[in-house]
Every structure is written in C-alpha cells, then in structure tokens.
Image (spheres, rainbow, N blue to C red):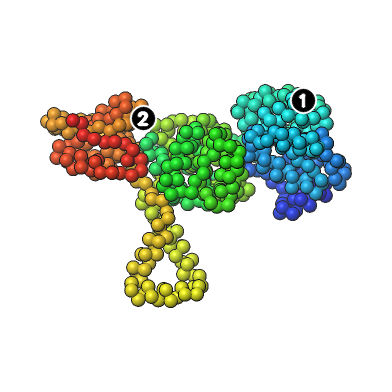
Amino acid sequence: MAFPALPAPLATALAERGYAEPTPVQSAVLEDGLAGRDLLVSAQTGSGKTVAYGMALAGELLGDAARMPPPGAPLALVVAPTRELALQVKTELSWLYARAGGVVGAAVGGMDPLAERRVLSRGTHIVVGTPGRMRDHIERGNLDATALKAVVLDEADEMLDLGFREELEAILDAAPEARRTLMFSATVPKGIGEMAKRYQRDAKRIAVGSEARQHNDIEYRGSLVAPHEIERAVVNILRHEDPRLAMVFCATRAAVNRLHANLTERGFATVALSGELSQAERTRALQSLRDGRARVCVATDVAARGIDLPDLALVIHAELPRDSETLLHRSGRTGRAGRKGISWLVVPHNRRRIAERLFQGAKLNVAIVPAPGADAVRAKDGERLREAATALLAEEPEDGDAAIGAALAAIATPEALATALVKLLRAPLPAPEELAEAPERQAPPPRERRDPAAAASGNWFRMDVGREDGADPKWLLPFICRRGHVTRDAIGRIRILGRETQFEVDPRVAAKFDDAVRRPVGGQDGRVRVERLR
C-alpha cells in the first residue's frame, strides 16, 4: 500500500529516504476522517511513530500551502522523555519538513539554555524537547505557546513513570484550548487515560496490534542461573550470539558501572549509559556504537529510553526489570524495522517466580533454555572460525602473500598451519566462562555425612559468601566442587550463615581440596575467598 495523499514536500522527502509504503501506525493515523482530531495511539517501540505524527501534523503546519509560513512562534510542540529521544525526533522532523522550509528547534535538558533561547527568538515552526526544559522556557517567556496548533506527547507512559506529570500538565495548560493533542504511548495505563480525558477532545483511540502482544520479530529466552553466576552468563551469551550490537540492562548506575568495567576487562568493546553521564559523554558513547568501535552497551532503563540503534540484535536483562511494561520497553530496543532480535533474561533461580509473573503480565511466550556453557561457546566459535577461514581462502592473495604461504608450507604441515590460523583467529575473543549445572537439574546436596568421625576431624572450610549474598546449596555445591576439584560425594554438611558459609570436606581429599582452593582463580570465582577453618 502506497502512502496516502500528502503535501508534495513531505512526499518527496519520504521518497528520498526510501519510504515505499507506510508502517501500520503511519497508515492508522492517516486514515480518512482523522484530520484535525485528537489521537491516543498505542504502538510498539520502533514502529515508525515519529514519522507517523510528523505526517499527521501536516494539516496543522502546512494546510494547503506548499511551504511553511515564515518562522515565528512555534506551531507545534513535541515532548519526549529523554534527551536522546528528543534529539532523534528533532532530526527526523527536520528532514521530513526540510523541503517545506520547516524550522525545528530544541528545548532539551542538559543542553545550553541560552543557545536554545536564541534559536527560539529567531523563530521556529516545531519545537522538540524534554518536559522540564520546555516548561522552563515557557515560564521564562522564551517559548511563546499562544500560536500552537498541536502538541504531541511521545512515549507519554514513560514520562509519567519518570514523574513528569506536573510538567506535562503545565505545558498543556499553557497551550491554546483549540489545539490538537496527540498522545503516543507503548501502553495506556490509568494515568495516561486520565490525562487523555482531561486534555483531549473526542480523541480517537488507535491500538496498532495488541499492546501486550509478543513482538513477532523478537525471540524471548530466559536462563536460570546461580545468583553469583549472572555476570558469567552474560559473558557467555554475548560470546555465543556474537551480535553486531548488544544492549545489557541493569537496574542501577552502580550495577552499570560494575558490569561495564568487568566486560571491558574481559575484552569486550563496551560503553556505559547511565544518568550520571554528561550529554557530550552520552553522545560519544552512542556514536562509538553506531560506527562500530563499540559492540556492547550496558545501560539503565532511563538512559536507554528512546535510543535507536538499527543493528541492535540482542538485548540481555542482566537484572530483572521492575515490571512487565519495562520488560517490553527494554526488549523493544531490538527487533525494529523488520529486523529479527533476541531478548534474553538472565534469571537468578531464587527469583524464578518473580520472572514468571513478569512473563505473564507481559503475555510473553519465553523459552526457558540453559545459559550457554563454555563448551557451547567453543562450538559456536568453531563454526564461525571455519566460516572465517573459508572466506579467507576464497580471497585472491595480495602481492607477496603466496610467497609467504609457500615459505610457511615448507616448515610446517597443513594441520599445523591450520591450527596456527585457528589460534590467530581465536586470540582476540574473550574467554568463555564455566557455568554450574542448571539449578533445576542439580541433585540436592547431602544433608549429613555418613561417617560421624569426619565431623570431628577438623576438615571444615569457609567461604565469604553467606545468606545476605543469596547463598543457597543449589549453587554452592557445584561452586565448591569446581573450586576444589572434587566430586559431590566429597562434600558433607553445609552451614549457611549471615556473611559466610562453612562446609565439610571428606578427610581423604581435604589436602587436595586445600591445595586447589589456594591457587589463583580468575573471573568471579576468584572474588570468593575459600579457606580452611582453623
């Protein structure tokens, strides 16, 4: 289906950008009979809604004219929850209205307010901004709202979640009553419904697909892991999938900083996005993702809101989202514009019930799969290395390559050369992590040793992880066996205390166990101290 009739400047701009036909949300807002009406639209993230409301505003901004009037007091406001989204919207509307002579200004928190005031004083047609900064410009008289013909609230549900109700109401109260009001939201919770009743007139409710319907282009997976192995699981998922771009979500700034540092240390090209970064730092981080210098972004929910990375193929939830809506918002960063994506939840086994409630609330079909182990990662590496080697063999040799190859063939067998090539290709890859057996498949630890003499033999050890750290026999037992190079039968009683765990080791292997736990260990295992009780 081609685009419906649009003003010539907009139609030309869309054609130049390669838009052949509208997305479902774009078709919905351009249906007959909706011109001039207030709209309450729910649509998935990445559905093309910025261009949708840009086209929907053509009647208010252009009417029947071929070009916009001279810029002055703005004719339309677009309010977005974050700086990144506001700046993206400004970019989209700028090219959409460029041929019509449209001037798009910005009122964005974190940017220079004096520079924004100068732009507003010279005149604009559209102003895009964040709630707090836009309200501030209106109250200071820098932004004249008297000529407004339309106001758009983009991702209105998120703005309410972030506590911007008062700012949004101040902006809407300052606009003329006769304006057109368009609200776009991934979901329509109670707060959005109340705001729509107050500030919209005879609004047309548009739902593009089911709000809670699983995004067809996103595959949802969940893996149960021991609480102390979350970071290892993230490492292995990144290595196993090897995406062009991945985003890893954490709940707090501190968790973002910690995981970012650990992934960088392991060899991943990683950037962090959290609220403590300046706008310049955020811009540099996003640019490094877009130009390929970084491949992993670790972010909080707020920092990642509105970010558009077309090549983002994988979203990892290193910490569970606070609710089902946040789960959908996070996951919606991938699977955009017809591309396929994966949303992978790393679930500590002691929070499995919480995760199941999130899945039910979002009405998602999540496949519960084991987190990739080191062997699975190496197997994937083997497939990719064979493909890389095959591609190299298909290339024409450059000057001198054949001579070097002949010299190497004279001193080594083909198998040795192939092995050397594998080592060379594998060298830059971060090492995979060993993971414990999935909790639901583990045998319960023995509650008591059969030999009561062993209890008095003094073969007791301790580790500095206790109940306060989520210690549980289901993952403690595999961890102890792995660190001490022993089998499950060698471990007796386990006492989980507040800040440490004490456990019993069979006296026949205690010396071997003691020797093993004294050796340096890398990764997260090395952060847990294990020692003999004296």
Residue situated in front as seen by the camera: 317 or 168 = 168
Above or below, 334 against 128 in this view is below
Residue depicted at x 36% and y 64% = 419
- Return the residue at label 2: 469
Q: Quadrant of residue 472?
A: top left
Instruction: Name the element at disc 2.
Output: helix
Q: Quadrant of residue 379?
A: bottom left
Above or below, 416 against 92 in this view is below
Whether residue 404 sits left or right of residue 334 in the image: it is left
Residue situated in front as seen by the camera: 501 or 436 = 501
Residue situated in front as seen by the camera: 272 or 278 = 278
- Return the residue at label 1: 174
Circle 2 residues within 10 Å: few <14, some 14–19, many ≥20? few
Residue 504 placement (x, y as % from top left)? 20, 33
Whether residue 322 sits left or right of residue 30 in the image: it is left
- What amino acid is labelled 2 in the image? Asp
